[in-house]
Amino acid sequence: MTIKAAFQVARKQFRLQVNFEVPATGVTALFGPSGCGKTTLLRAMAGLERCPGHFWLGEQCWQDQQFFVPVHQRRLGYVFQEASLFAHLSVLGNLEYGWRRLPPAERRADKAQIIDWLGLAPLLRQKAAELSGGQRQRVAIGRALLTSPELLLLDEPLSALDGKAKREILPLLERLSAQARVPVFYVTHAPEEVERLADRVLLMEQGRITHNDTLQQALARPHTPLYKDDEVAGIIEGRLAAPLADGRLPFDCAAGRIWLADEAPPTSDVVRLRILASDVSIALAPVVDISIVNQLPATVASITPLAKGRMLLRLTLVGGDHISAQLSAYSITQLALAPGCQCYALIKAAALLV
Ligand SMILES: Nc1ncnc2c1ncn2[C@@H]1O[C@H](COP(=O)(O)OP(=O)(O)OP(=O)(O)O)[C@@H](O)[C@H]1O
């Protein structure tokens, strides 16, 4: 199932012109500089901007040349930067607001499960006006989910929160799409949120989508706007095994086992590992007597020049995952590296994104 969208919004000083197709599963991040049109695009999907275009959610048409489903008839949840809760209602009252308005047959969301998952049980009787920013945002997410949406739109839901509240909510958002079983569009300025949450990335600039990428593609772009300082990263998904007595933590992925020095609470969930291009070196054969424990066989997929004589290698690992390595032009010549070469990626450090 896919989402197909095209919109043209014309304002005095701004024009949004987009046409894209993404899978109707998982999290699609909208990333781009301030004013490039991310919120305008979300509003168009919600039916809040009446503009020419089309919008298909799988087989359902919400808009085309002849047809327009008004916003109140679209089954979607919308969470804004600052949660706009009903101040006079309790947390439970806010949560039940949309839920009550749905005919019982259409209430697919499990209220008790959502309250439990978002940790809202101790807050149910509190007035919305008495909540912290992070608590308000959890209530806003719960309220959106309880309307049994078929699409969730999140517009920088963490940007108004302090670091502690962000750390509390990010792990919840990581499970949001799977938990709610709906596609999520997620506007953010924060590369860390893209790395942790996104499956797909729409990179936007001046009202247009410049790239419609998988997460791996977006991260591997040599001049990706996600990393202005060229700190390109690769993300690999895998599972943690039990830590060893010597402190090493095994991470098992399609490319094999990677040893980490992190500490992490045990989890059977899929987790993401972040490997910076500057933390990857290349050898043509396995190296012995070296402190780097992770040496993964790889194939050079491409080589792109960066600034200041540095080069970015895109590497394909066994199993198909990609990471990048940043090397000097001198090293590339010394090792005669070219696309198609077999080599070993020596990974100096990798950070768990859990
Ligand atoms: N109601 C409006 N009337 C006229 N222009 C508007 C209106 N709302 C937004 N704009 C303009 O449309 C452009 C896109 O705005 P939009 O809010 O979609 O950008 P954004 O990428 O979400 O920005 P930010 O990251 O700062 O939230 C901007 O130039 C903005 O000034």
Image: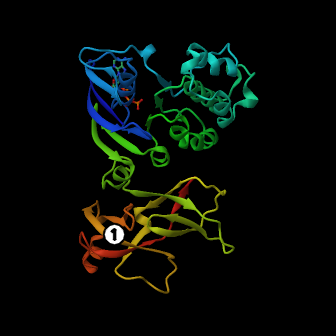
For the image, the number of numbered tags is 1
User: For this rendering, which residue is in front, 143 or 101?
Assistant: 101
Nearer to me, 226 or 127: 127
Question: What is the quadrant of the N terminus in the image?
Answer: top left
* Crowding at mark 1 (Cα within 10 Å: few <14, some 14-19, many 20+): many
Q: In this view, which residue lies farthest toward the bottom?
A: 289
Q: Is residue 282 left or right of residue 103?
A: left
Location of residue 51 in the rendering, given as x and y in whole percent from the top left corner:
28, 17
Q: Residue furthest front?
A: 105
> Does the numbered disc 1 mark a residue whose Cβ is under 8 Å from ligand 1?
no
Specify the quadrant of the image occupied by residue 201.
Answer: top left
Residue at the image point whose x is 52% and y is 40% from the top: 178
Q: Position of residue 99 (x, y in %)?
A: 59, 19
Task: Determine whether, in the image, residue 159 is placed left or right of residue 7.
Answer: right
Question: In percent of the image, x 46 and y 49: which residue is there?
Answer: 195
Position of 203 relative to 331 (above/below): above
The image shows residue 284, relative to residue 32, as above or below, that is below
The amino acid type found where label 1 is placed reads Leu
Residue 65 showing in the rendered view: yes
| Quadrant hosting residue 166 | top right
* Colour mapping used in the image: rainbow
Name the image quarter holding residue 323: bottom left
Residue 312 image point, x, y percent? 31, 63
In the structure shown, which secondary structural element does the residue marked by tag 1 occupy? Answer: strand
Mark 1, residue position: 327
Name the residue located 34 percent from the left edge and 38 percent from the top edge: 22
* Quadrant position of ligand 1: top left
Q: Is residue 206 visible?
A: no
Residue closer to the observer: 63 or 279: 63
x%, y% of residue 86?
A: 62, 15
Q: Residue at x 68, y 30 (%)?
A: 112
